[in-house]
Image: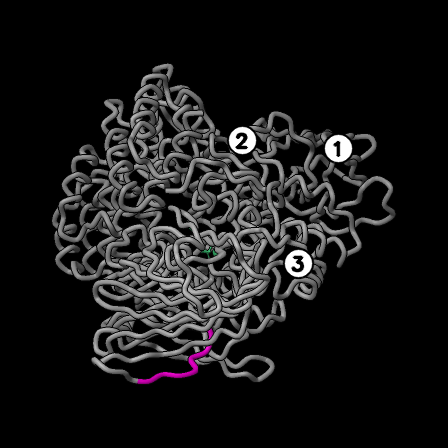
Amino acid sequence: MSSRQAIRRLDYTPPSYLIDRVDLTFELSDTHAKVISRLIIKRNKGVSSDTPLVLHGEELTLEGIKLDGAPLTSAHYVVDETSLTIANMPDDGILEIVTRLLPAENTSLMGLYQSNGNFFTQCEAEGFRKITYYLDRPDVMAKFTTTIIADKTKFPVLLSNGNRVGSGTMDKNRHWVKWVDPFKKPAYLFALVAGKLVVLAGTHTTPSKRNINIEIYVEPGNLDKCHHALAAAQKAMAWDEERFGLEYDLDTYMIVAVSDFNMGAMENKGLNIFNTKFVLAKPDTATDVDFDGIDSVVAHEYFHNWTGNRVTCRDWFQLSLKEGLTVYRDQEFSSDIGSRAVQRISNVRALRETQFAEDAGPQAHPIRPDEYLEINNFYTWTIYEKGSEVVRMYATLLGIDGFRAGMELYFKRHDGQAVTCDDFRAAMADANGVDLSQFERWYSQAGTPVLRASAQYNEAAHTYTLTITQSCAPTPGQAEKLPFHLPFAIGLIDRRGHDLPLQLLGESVAGDTTRVLDIRDTTQTFTFINVPCPPVPSLLRDFSAPVVLEYDYSDDELVFLMANDSDAFARWEAANTFALQLLKNQYAAAGRGEKVAAPAAFIAAYKKLLSSDKLDPALVALMLELPRENYLLEQLSDVDPVRLFEVCRSIKHQIARELRQELLAVYQHLNDGTPYAYDGEQVARRSLKNICLDYLAELDEPMIAQLLAKQYQRADNMTDRLAALKALVNRDGGEAQLADFAAQWQSDALVMDKWFALQATSRRPGALSRVQQLLEHPGFSIKNPNKVRSLITAFCLANPPHFHAADGYGYAFAADHIIELDKINPQIAARLASAFNRWTKVDAGRRELMQQELERIRGTEGLSSDTFEIVTKALG
Ligand code: B3K
Ligand code: ZN
């Protein structure tokens, strides 16, 4: 295990040695793997000749080492748990290293491992050092060739990065395939796959008339579930060509699906490896959300070929350089192929539910962190989602063309290099001739800025003055924050519901109806002139910056914005703010022992939404969804999560009771028996239909029970079937349907993940004991990350009333499994440990219980640095 020494950004030094070429040979067998690595290595310019060569290496058995053909003995080198050091290294030389690995015993799923008998690799961030001794850092970029030797029958498919240049047969029923990757790359982008796989192939022709083969490899029996992923890859290629002028650079783009995988997918050069969850889908096994997820993950990994692979990170502190940018790109892709409004609202909601909590808690870090113990802990909401918001702000400040010019300059300057976030910012600034120096604070300061807005209308002068004050609370290690530079988009709406053309004091003519204000100071005032009547402000349109906005809207103004705002995000936001205020007030009322009820104005606003025939049904569905408990928890302190849940449930019940007729009418109107298709219109209709169903399921009526059972039984797609099952499971247990579902899908692991997750997140009493029983289910395996996520992590992170049960059993359950998983797969254990991050938010009794469990975990002998880092920071 790596030492507990923090790695610091400012300690960066260039590598002492560089590697030009790597020739790898893998001999794979059932019991072990032998890796022969030949490195052409040279000392970096300006480095003194007595500097030793220190290669990274972990959990390796070294079988031999030669320098320029001559065997080295243990007198020439030193090996310890994490490195191999050669003291007297010539200026340049050829190093040949033989290592032996045990992939079948590798449960961390980092380096080379086996899944269902097949071989896979995962090298980002530091997995290559578990394959061979190497300079495993992203600023060492080399050209790789890979030869794989294995049994022909057991491992007919042998894949690696780049182009297949040769193959042949050998003795003992073995065969070999050789791959050459013409592009320099860091070791984290290396990949190898060997196994019994089948392939779905397609093509794409680029604007420069190159034909690209797209190949999707899966286990036999799954070919009929690859068509959506293939189409996604084709769409992503066309989109990147059109939007950024970026073409794919190899002849073949391969995706391989594996069921044991720590995350969603990995962008290895030319050979992306994916969690099956983001490849396999057909209408009866996958929901609309799954299909959407496949589009965005396929696009994300494909887009990395330029933003991440061609231009990579100098060091891991720069991770957001490739991740924030690539998330921004995949979000833009999804907006263009689907509904921009729905995409934006869903992304903002996810950011607030996850990243805002991270930024307010013990793990808060800037998008370019200053130090870490374990880099795997830094694949966070902040790096990815806030990182994407920061990239989006460039586009908002510079305009879409200015942003593209910045991207072009970035590639012109840095293609083939390993660079920093500062390099990206400089390209954006230089391409547009603007000063973005203050913008740097988004990279160095953690925490979510709070923008307080207040406004005044001057009846006589027809002016409207808006004052914006920004602040940012302290975060660990950062007591004081300096003001951020951000774009603040605004509109003003007149009383008829029309957007006013906006004219700032000093401007001669009115401009657009949405203006992006440049915010740089702690307090700034903007005066709009020629405002004929007191307007309702529409603030932070399209969520133009990742901030918390405070403005004292009245309920009437929120209802007005819900009905009139031309900006879809702001319109949804009005509904969200209304619901949030209501739930917070009702939670406080419940604490005083008062009766919980939504005012008539709230119910009326929902009623109006349900009767709207102009709005996109998907937008209505999003507006009807109450804020989730975890998000609410963040807005409160000393929280009793069980009471919070009861308040939400009781409001939901009231909505269902009072709007029964409207909900049923919309449900029946949308449930018109149209045969299933996956298209934007149907997805939108299903989302509204199923939110109506979700409300109706609150009603204890035989007619509703029948309706749920009927939808479950008759559904011709997984979206509708699962929506009905979820409602049943939360309502009366749905035992018959759960059994039916398991009988039908027991051999489809991904569908069974849904079955586990529904039960893990069920709000009915007894959830924990059902989860404990399910741990014994033959379909469950503690070694499979998807299973752990569906059952254990879902319970701990997505079932707050049960996880936070007052008896503390939920906490003990989480801690037991963190300790157990830490020995099997530290990355998965550390993610689960984040369930304890917000322990200071809950009431005193629960706080004490959570703290005890955190201390129990921290006291565990041999704890990985992954879990140790999360738990130590949580304890503060
Ligand atoms: N770059 C990978 C994530 C690797 C995580 C390593 N712990 C997937 C992605 O962001 O596309
Ligand atoms: Zn990524």
Q: For numbered disc 2, what is the local secondary structure?
A: helix
Q: Amino acid at mark 3?
A: Lys
Which residue occupies the foreground of this view, 190 or 465? 190
**Mark positioned earlier in the residue sequence (1 or 2):** 1
Q: Which residue is mark 3?
A: 45
Closest to the observer, 46 or 743: 46
Residue under label 2: 555
* Percent position of residue 543, x then y: 59, 45
Q: Looking at the image, can residue 280 be seen? A: no
Q: CA distance from mark 1 to mark 2?
A: 26 Å
Of the two numbered discs 1 and 3 on the same chain, state the one appearing first in sequence. Answer: 3
- Left or right: residue 183 versus residue 723 is right
Question: Any magenta on residue 167?
Answer: yes
Residue under the image location 55 percent in, 83 percent down: 210
The crowding category of the residue bearing disc 2, from other C-alpha atoms within 10 Å (few below 14, some 14 to 19, many at least 20), is some
Residue 378 vertical placement versus 216 (above, below) = above
For the residues labelled 2 and 3, the Cα–Cα distance comes to 67 Å
Mark 1 residue CB less than 8 A from any atom of ligand 2: no
Horizontally, residue 771 falls left or right of residue 325, namely: left
Q: Can you give x and y, in whole percent of width and height, for residue 779 in the image? A: 17, 53
Nearest the viewer among 578 and 430 is 430
Assess whether mark 2 and mark 1 are in contact (beta carbons under 8 angstroms).
no
- Residue under label 1, please give it: 524
| Label 1 to label 3: alpha-carbon separation | 50 Å
| Callout 3: SS | loop
Q: Secondary structure at mark 1?
A: strand
Foreground mark, 1 or 2, reads 1
Q: Which residues are magenta?
A: 162-168
| Residue 773 in sight from this viewpoint | yes
Looking at numbered disc 1 in the image, what kind of residue is underneath it?
A: Gln
Q: Give the label, 1 or 3, closer to the camera.
A: 3
